[in-house]
Amino acid sequence: MLQIGAQLYTVRMYCQNERDLGRTLERVAKIGYRNVQLSGLGNIAPKRVKALCDANGLRIVLTHNPEQKFLENVEALIDEHLLYGCKYVGLGAMSERYRRPEWVDCFAKDMEAPARKLRDAGLIFMYHHHNFEFGHLPEGGTIMDRLLAALPAEIMGVTADTYWLQMGGVDANRWLADHADRLHCVHFKDFLPVDFSVRMAAVGQGNMDFGKMLDTLRQNGVTEYVLVEQDDCYGESPFDCLQKSYDSLKALGC
């Protein structure tokens, strides 16, 4: 059964110290969420983060971590995630140097050893994409194609993001169906056209068919968590946005 959660990057402004994080987790729990992703937090000791989540009945199910930590101190990441009881160890994006055609393959080479160490510890490396991974490379294919070919599903999952899939020019639902073996966690974020631009929106406030995507994820037998994320709330309270997304997902049977 799919479980829903809140990506704390949505409320990162309110997660920069221990006191604010406690208040934030309390509000997130009151909305009804029982799972959270850690991302964008301030310098708070992992033990305190875990204690605050426990105090509010929230499970840590996914994280985002600095790229350098994977490359230079993956053992610390392993220890933190075992403390959290969290299986999915995420990277928000590859750093800019890797995005150039001549360096794309270097990312996979550099990440392979840390990803295997995570797997050996019972954890899974989760790569979160944006839209740039779907741009075509001069020699053909895309960055995403190269990543999937170089890092097999046994050592790299993909945290698919519905908004960035659509921004990348792909059929979001088709992509979810075609890459089921990677999708342990998925970010739900709506896509709202405004005049001649687009905005990120709470689930149900834009033009994406989340009912159809939920059916696809339920059928794939791999996805455990759907995590609501909204990077920019355009002046609206991010807590209100989390509430709207929660209500929309509940109405869809989550």
Image: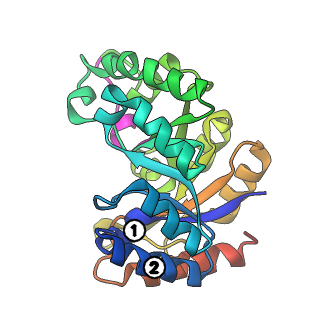
| Disc 2 packing (10 Å; few <14; some 14–19; many ≥20) | many
Q: Which residues are magenta?
A: 128-138
- Total marks placed: 2
Residue under pointer 2 = 241
Where 90 sits versus 228, above or below? Answer: above
Give percent across and percent down for residue 72: 31, 27
Relative image position of residue 156 (x, y in whole percent): 54, 29
Query: Vertically, is 61 above or below 196?
Result: above
Does the magenta portion include 130? yes
Q: Could one spot residue 235 in this view of the protein?
A: yes
| Mark found first going from the N terminus, 1 or 2 | 1
Residue closer to the observer: 55 or 242:
55
Image disc number at residue 103: none
> Which residue occupies the foreground of this view, 167 or 222?
222
**Amino acid beneath label 1:** Thr
Relative height, residue 26 to residue 167 (above, below): below
Q: Which residue is mark 1?
A: 10
Residue 57 in the magenta stretch? The answer is no
